[in-house]
Amino acid sequence: MDLFDIFAGADSWHTRRLLRQAADVSDEKLDSPVSGTSAVIGWDKPDKNLREILERIVQTKEVWVAALTGGEMPSLDGRPPADRTPSALLDRFEKADAEFHRILCDVRNRGAWDETFVDALCEPAETFTFGGMFADVITFNAYRRLAALDAFHKLGVTVQGSGSPIEYEQAGMPA
């Protein structure tokens, strides 16, 4: 068993399920205020609605991919509505997640979790280990996936499962 495959796979699998579920939710519900979200990082702000929660999961991968590849900082605010629909979020996620997974599979295969990289998107630039960055992504995306589940429930939308890694494993660890 490879823990990277379990954690990365469960994160991707559950995020896809949530984004697909969101496609069946009206814009009114996606944009309805939700309570109970937190600013999980000191410089962050609480997400105001289900759409923001889901977009932050997508943005997390987009930003880290940009940091890992030397790309430009993706837009975090002010995207046109067409880029924020559930199907557009799923498309954005698939692109970012594939690259994120490709990079980190190489890190895993080389046993390079303790190697560092410079994140030039930070001001000032910061150095992180690949393992620490991956743990960060899994931690904060897990929080947001659970916040999304809570928001779905508060909106009266039934969502199957909890998205736990055990559930992912029992589902046959689909891609």
Image: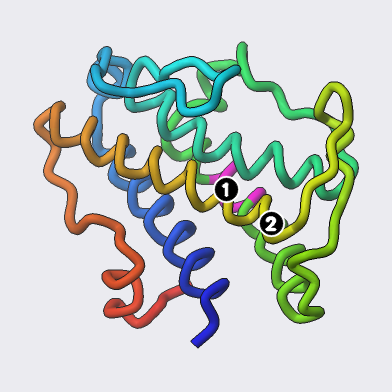
Q: Amino acid at mark 2?
A: Phe
Q: Amino acid at mark 1?
A: Val
Residue found 17% across the figure and 55% down from its top: 160
Per the picture, the main secondary structure of the magenta-coloured stretch is helix
* Relative image position of residue 157 (x, y in whole percent): 14, 37
Question: 156 above or below 167?
Answer: above
Q: CA distance from mark 2 to mark 1?
A: 11 Å
First in residue order: circle 2 vs circle 1: 2
Q: Are marks 2 and 1 in contact (CB under 8 Å)?
A: yes
Q: Nearer the viewer, residue 96 or 162?
A: 162
Q: Nearer the viewer, residue 83 or 145?
A: 145
* Relative image position of residue 5 (x, y in whole percent): 54, 75
Badge 2 crowding class, 10 Å Cα cut-off, few under 14, some 14 to 19, many 20 or more, is many
Query: Is residue 93 inside the magenta stretch?
Result: yes
Mark 2 lies on residue: 100
Query: Is residue 172 inside the magenta stretch?
Result: no
- Is disc 2 placed on a helix, strand or loop? helix
Left or right of 77 on screen, residue 167: left
- Front label number (2 vs 1): 1
To which quarter of the image does residue 107 belong?
bottom right
Question: 78 above or below 36?
Answer: above
* Relative image position of residue 3 (x, y in whole percent): 52, 76
- Is disc 1 placed on a helix, strand or loop? helix
* Relative image position of residue 60 (x, y in whole percent): 60, 38
Badge 1 crowding class, 10 Å Cα cut-off, few under 14, some 14 to 19, many 20 or more, is some
- Furthest residue toward bottom: 1
Question: 44 above or below 133?
Answer: above
Point out the stretch of residues depicted in magenta: 91-96
Mark 1 lies on residue: 137
Residue found 56% across the figure and 20% down from its top: 42
Question: 168 above or below 27?
Answer: below
